Image: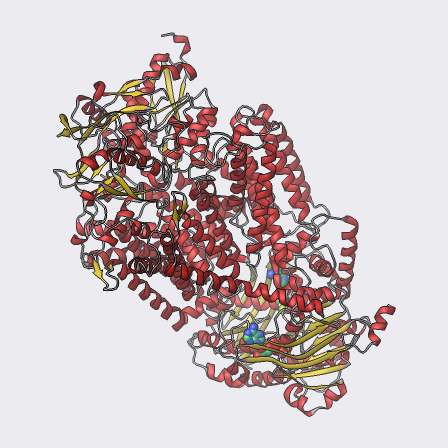
Amino acid sequence: LAAHSASVIRLAIMSDCKGAFGGAYELDIGGAEAALAQYAHGKPVSSKKPSAGMTGITIAGHPVKIVGYGCGNDTVPVAISETKRLMEQLKADIMIGPLSGDEAVTIAHYAQKHPTKTFIIGTAGSQDPTLQIAPKNMFRYHGDGAQWNAGTGILAYKKLGWRKAAIIMDDYSFGWTSAAGLIADFCGAGGKIVKRVFPPLNTTDYAPYVQQLPAPSKVDGYFWVVGGTGTGPSLKAYESAYGKVDPKKFVGNLFFFFQSGFADVAPRLIGAYYGGFGNAPGLKTAGAKQYEATMKKWFGPAGFNVTDSFVYNYFNAAHALVIGLTKSGGALGASLNASLPRSIKAGYQVSNGGQVKLDSNRQAIADQYPQQIVKGPDGKPAAKIVGYVPGVDQSFGGFFKKTSPPPGRSQPPCVKHKFPWAGHIKAVQNGVITKKTIG
Amino acid sequence: MRRAVSAFDWRLLVRRLPVGVAVGTTVFALVWVLFWAPSTNFGPAIHSPANFLITLLNGLTLAALMFIVASGFSLIFGLMRVVNMAHGSFLLLGGYIAYEVQQSMTNGGGLTVFSSQVNAWDWLVPAIVAAAAIGGIGLVTQQVFLRWNMGQDLRQALITIAISVIIADQVVAHFPLESSIEKGSAVNTSWPGAIDRLVNLHIAGVQYSVARLTMLGLGVAVGIALWLWLYRTKTGMVIRAGVDDRQMTSALGVNIQVTFAIAFVVGASLAALGGAVFTSYAGVNPTTDGQWLLNSLVVVIVGGLGSIFGTVAGALLYALVYNFSISYLPTTGGDCCGQYSPVLTFVLLALVLAFRPQGLFGRPA
Amino acid sequence: MSPFAWHPRPMSEKNLVELVIGVTLLLFLAVFPVFGVGYWVSFVLTQTFLIGIAAASLVFLTAYGGMVSLAQTALYGISAFALGNMVTKGAVKGLHLGLDPWLAVVLAIAITTAIGLVFGAVASRSAGIYFLMITLTYAVIAFTFFGQVTQVSGFSGIAGIADRTPALVGDPVTQPNRLYYIALVTALVVYFAIRHVVRTPFGISLQGVRDDPVRMGSLGYNVALHRTLAFTFAAFIASLAGVLYGWWNGVIAPDNVGLGATVDLLIVAVIGGLGRVEGAWLGAFAFVVINNYVRDVSVPVLGGSFNTVIGLIFLAIVIVSPSGLMGLWDRLWDAAGYREGSGPRAAAAAGTAGPQA
Amino acid sequence: MGEQLLSVEGLNAFYGSAHVLDDVSFDVQNEQPVAVIGRNGMGKTTLCAAIMGLTPPRATGSIRFLGTELIGRPSYKIAKLGIGYVPQGRRLFPSLSVDEHLRMVSGRNGRNGGWNPERVYKLFPRLAERKRNGGAQLSGGEQQMLTIGRALLLNPKLLIMDEPSEGLAPTVIEQLVDTCKRFQDEGVALLLIEQNLGVATALADRQLVMVAGSIAVETTAEQLRNDPDSQRRYLGVEPVAAT
Amino acid sequence: MTEAAAHAESAEPILRLRGVGRRFGGLHAVSDVDLDVIPGERRAILGPNGAGKTTLFNVVAGDLPVTSGRIELFGRDVTREPARQRAKLGLARSYQQSRLFLGLSVEDNIFLAIVGVGRGHLRPVVLPRKDAELRARAREAARRAAIDGRLGDVVGALAHGEHRQVALAMALAAEPKLLMLDEPASGLSRGERQLLTELLLALDADITLILIEHDMDIALRVAERVTMMHEGRVIVEGTPAEIRANQLVHDLYLGSHYGSEPEGGASG
Ligand SMILES: Nc1ncnc2c1ncn2[C@@H]1O[C@H](COP(=O)(O)OP(=O)(O)OP(=O)(O)O)[C@@H](O)[C@H]1O
Ligand SMILES: Nc1ncnc2c1ncn2[C@@H]1O[C@H](COP(=O)(O)OP(=O)(O)OP(=O)(O)O)[C@@H](O)[C@H]1O
Ligand SMILES: [Mg+2]
Ligand SMILES: [Mg+2]
């Protein structure tokens, strides 16, 4: 390509280094950097500490410089000031990030006002950034919180035989969005939600909220959408009210097996279903193996869990960026936005040859994989893929609209509705998608 | 004269107003909860005595935990006038230490251990180690950073804020120690199996958690021990005197620094003890520190500084209002009103302070 | 040289030096956007000015009223929330009333000041540490209110405030200089307003209230009224910062008024020095710069991220200088052998502790 | 004459940069009362503070008590050496009741002398009636009594009293003087700061006059009592020009 | 002037207490006190320590509410009025333990005393003319209390005795109709005591003075009438001469002679 245009491309990576997800900082950066190492000649300065930086990244002849790492704390004010620091002080052209839902909302607004910059969401699950705000320069190569749970509600209905369930959800946008996926799905199949309980974030004592849930004898089960730091405490509160958790009566979202969840709550939930991140860590596909090998290669010594979905989402974001920049020949702004791939091959996806497609709002349409917590061979909890939900889009086939009320305490309502994937959910056994329809 | 009389009436009214409002609110709240409570989760207590009892017990047991934590804060804050903004961090670190000790005693390998694997010692030793370790950190904090600037409230508060920032970051950087788990992850310990069960209270058929009742007992025990120490020994007098006038206390031959150091260590250890309990009861994570700093502040504020009874009262009021407002606010539609209980809780606390600025049991400033 | 009081004294050598520094600095700031780095204009300095205004309201209350208020963050947040709810339009969170931008500004300030009046009246019987506490509950009320009452915000906050600024302000993204100057001028006005007010009977009696409220009562003053009005005035100042913040940031969220943010403002004020109003901006500057630039320093032994470093820096500042950076300046001046005012005795009060009993 | 109990040599004290004590030297012999008199603001309280290791940020020179250097020592150690201090302005503890004031101090200083709370109550019966009152809930005179009682409980060898008669009713002053006179028998030396010449001269023969931060002159009670002229000179019945 | 004189002539007392009592828990610090003070009078209140003198001042000034009885000030029932209203009516007091504004200069302390009884507490602007006038009054009051040498100094840095002087200046500066001084001489040196006595003797005739003092030289010289309190009650009232002659007073209070300074060649 034209040698004269070898200007430096300035890249920023943003994650959380404080607050509930503070532990994910190095992971996320590692995920993005592994892609840059694999596809863009980058060399990590330290294979143990990704945030130590990276040298030698080149795309389409352009050197790429990571100008800085953003450190959020899961709150809006810090997200915005970190974004400003990265984009304005350090003059990044492109940002990969942020980590969480509300952060993504605020950065979407920022993106709207800064059309010459490009934003690829790291791993945030809120609906608004791409459904409501949808700036032209913002991309997300993974599902939102509702998508992640698509199919899981149907499984509860069909496989666990639930008819009446109660739901407890974090009282903020991610909790609502995540719950929305379960509610829409479960009610769509014919289930009834008899009670919705919303404890506020950072609740000290979940006991009075758990008390509001109908007793286990009165419902078939509970959708447990308390996340981040609340999963463990809320389950403990349940135990001190009703005794031991019966995993068959619990269906959760990604927090059942995510990060600390694996050590903190999963041991109590062996057998429970949950939505996960919509991807399929542990699938034995070639793509998955390749992805894991890549991660091990670059950040093996850092020792972190390569199947972690945060890592994976950041990896895909950076991967997409490499593809886009290559295609645009290093050109930024509008031409980069036009060049960013509308479809990428992602390790933990299988349909369409392992592709994640983007919709017209630059939001992923992806397969989803409901999971179950099982006891692994080493005695530790393990995640098992149990289902395959093909091609879930953000609007749930038109169910969520830009004009409809966003997920909230009473949204969506519990109504019967046939979603595109209903009747097409396939069983997955030992990491292989079978022909058997399970919902 | 007539003017004076009318002024008299008006003032009297204003002076009685708080009492009137307080009595009125209490009566209304009681009637509401006991007999009325339409469109709430459980309906009035007479219809659903079990839920009322559970709410009450939840309130009392939470109050006990709040008391344990806040009494440490109150000791440091009320007696030494040090607003220890690192109190939440002490609790957090104490919680992680208790977790690590229990893990290593039960070979948890980083996974939550079940109460069936935990005996009384597996719980007590971690709690004691945590309390001792944090007591040590408290001692260092007090000796290195606070000892020489006693009386400068704000400066000390700022110093402890800086320390809490550092501790928070250090916790995220190093805990949990187990390498297969992400740093900064939430962790929890388990109650000993013996108390991790429900007991039938034989009242309205309520089954209640023995662990929570144990927590209540622990709170009472801590309260009694503190009371004996502060009001039945010279140490208590010396601390109070030292707070009033450090120099004069010293001029009476009292090595006030030693006493302050002891008080600080005890206060910090109580935070860690609370942390150990909280780790079993809910679990700790890197946001726990702010949450508990706030809890402690509120309890101590409402109760009144440096008074054990005040701390008891503050903890009870806070925990009961919290529990009852969540359970007994009406829930009509999705957006009202149950989820406003946190707001309501704090508005009530502000009102308490407005009418009794020094807190329920505080000495007038 | 009391850190707490302003006396109409003849200008000392130190005052003169300070005046010269101040004027030079102002001139520098006035021309800064012409040659300065864009980021410093749009981010560091504009933010310094507006945080400084909020901090100045706290310094005013603390230094002259003896009221360490933790509600200033909440108040400036309330102002920004009010602005956001009234000015935004369309599919954003909150009420999005879409009012005229100027009208919204006036209403935001008026609402905040009125809330300040109510808050102040309720808190006016408290003093010292109790005042700190009751204002802390205000902060928590504000945080939980905006977090839980989704009609007016919810945790993701209200965005799009910067899209609907008055014409004078323009688009803060494309025309950062305008907001820079507006913030600078507002900061100056606030600074001189405070300096003026503390020399008036109201200001001096406020200082009396700080030192001994009971005695003030027996001198004929209505102490509660004084406290209330001082708090209202401070709320008014904070509301200005809130409006500026709304324009500057475009987004306001409950975490802007959370415990962390509340403590941050206290840190700003204390680092600057609670004794002198100038300190508010100095503290804000230090805070913004430290938060922005301390990134790549790693801590030996302890490990951890730059947050540990920031904690250590704040610790160092507080330890080195009891009355913040302004106090450091005062001490340096004294150490250099200069003395202000009337003979050796004047310096005697220098060593006294914080303004709070 | 007894042995040397307290000796102050070349003592200077500063508040910040204000030079308040200027080269003060004197000594107190065992069992011998000494009074320091002087006008307001001359530095008498500062002298006490310097001896007790209190407020002044900076003191130079030498203060020896029974051969032990006091400068640089923390004040609780100074108190433990056997110096009781009755500060000006009482400085009671509002958080403590009368009884607690006394119990807190009693038995602190290892010396067993004859003072215990009961004896203090006998000395000041009013205090016995007010046992439960807080330190701030006493009348001015009662506060003064408690301050003195508190210092006595240390069983000091030297009692430093800064204007003890301030705010006391004449009868109580009389009683106080009687009590202090008995100290000599009990081996308690007295360093008395007084504005009330009657008390000062009744209690101490040696009178040190403090002017502008230094001991201007030493005189005797006898002289002072009988010489209105020196009273006027040292205690400034006329406004003194030098201030 | 004429108005004041007219006022003085009317027998209407400037301060009238009827059955005033104040309890602290079970302790009757003041009980059933009746007292009439007429305009222009100099009244001393004596009594042993703990007799209830300061408490009486506190209830009259409004710093403490009464538990029984009724207080009339300038012909008006002020029993339930707060302290600040009474100050506005023309009552100024000093405290036994000086209560000063330690963070303010001497001048500002006195300035506050002046502003307090006037209007414009809440004036948030500087009016140079008006402020200069108020400050001139403040300096004048400082001069009368002989503390004008330290006008600009922060009160926190003054010695004990100097605090007393500032407190006195503040009481004077308010130009009260009723001045109540609680042991103004305590902590003052002989020199300052002398000045104080002269100052009190030379006080405007239309200022009413109530004085608590343990220094008999001052009290009995300044006062025209003396009220003797004991255990919360008024036990004797009379002229200084009557008081001196009263055996009860001697037994309870005066003792032999340490209360007064040995004047000149007085015997020890
Ligand atoms: N804390 C302080 N800071 C600065 N200066 C002080 C302080 N305390 C006292 N001074 C000054 O030191 C000088 C001596 O004060 P000191 O209190 O020793 O006087 P004193 O002789 O005890 O007077 P008095 O008889 O009034 O008690 C005074 O001029 C006073 O203003
Ligand atoms: N706030 C209070 N609480 C309880 N008792 C109090 C309080 N204030 C004063 N007293 C008691 O009331 C009695 C009268 O006190 P008061 O101060 O009026 O005495 P006084 O006549 O001024 O004595 P003095 O000459 O010693 O100052 C005293 O016995 C005192 O202990
Ligand atoms: Mg003195
Ligand atoms: Mg008195």
Q: Is residue B271 above or below residue C19?
A: below
In the rendered image, the residue lying farthest to the top is: A2
Residue plotted at (56% across, 24% down) = C175
Q: Quadrant of residue A155?
A: top left
Question: The N terminus of chain A is located in which quarter?
Answer: top left
Image coordinates for residue E249, horizontal then vertical, percent? 67, 88
Q: Position of residue A108 (x, y in %)?
A: 42, 28
Judged left or right of residue C28, residue A176 is left
Residue D187 lies left or right of residue A372; in this view the side is: right
Q: Is residue B91 left or right of residue A293?
A: right
**Visible in this render: residue A49?**
no
Front one among A142 and A30: A142
Q: Is A137 positioned to the left or the right of D217 in the image? A: left
Question: Which quadrant would residue A79 be assigned to in this image?
Answer: top left
Q: Nearer the viewer, residue C193 or A424?
A: A424
Vertical arrangement, residue C313 with respect to residue C181, above or below: below
Q: Is residue A107 visible?
A: yes
Quadrant location of residue E77?
A: bottom right
In percent of width and height, residue D40 lies at 68, 68
Front-lying residue, C158 or C260 = C158
The image's colouring method is: secondary structure
- Extreme-bottom residue of the structure: E247
Q: How many marks?
A: 0
- Which residue is more in the foreground, B313 or B117? B313
Question: Can you tell me which quadrant of the image ligand 1 is in?
Answer: bottom right
Q: Position of residue E166 (x, y in %)?
A: 70, 64
Quarter holding the C terminus of chain A? Answer: top left
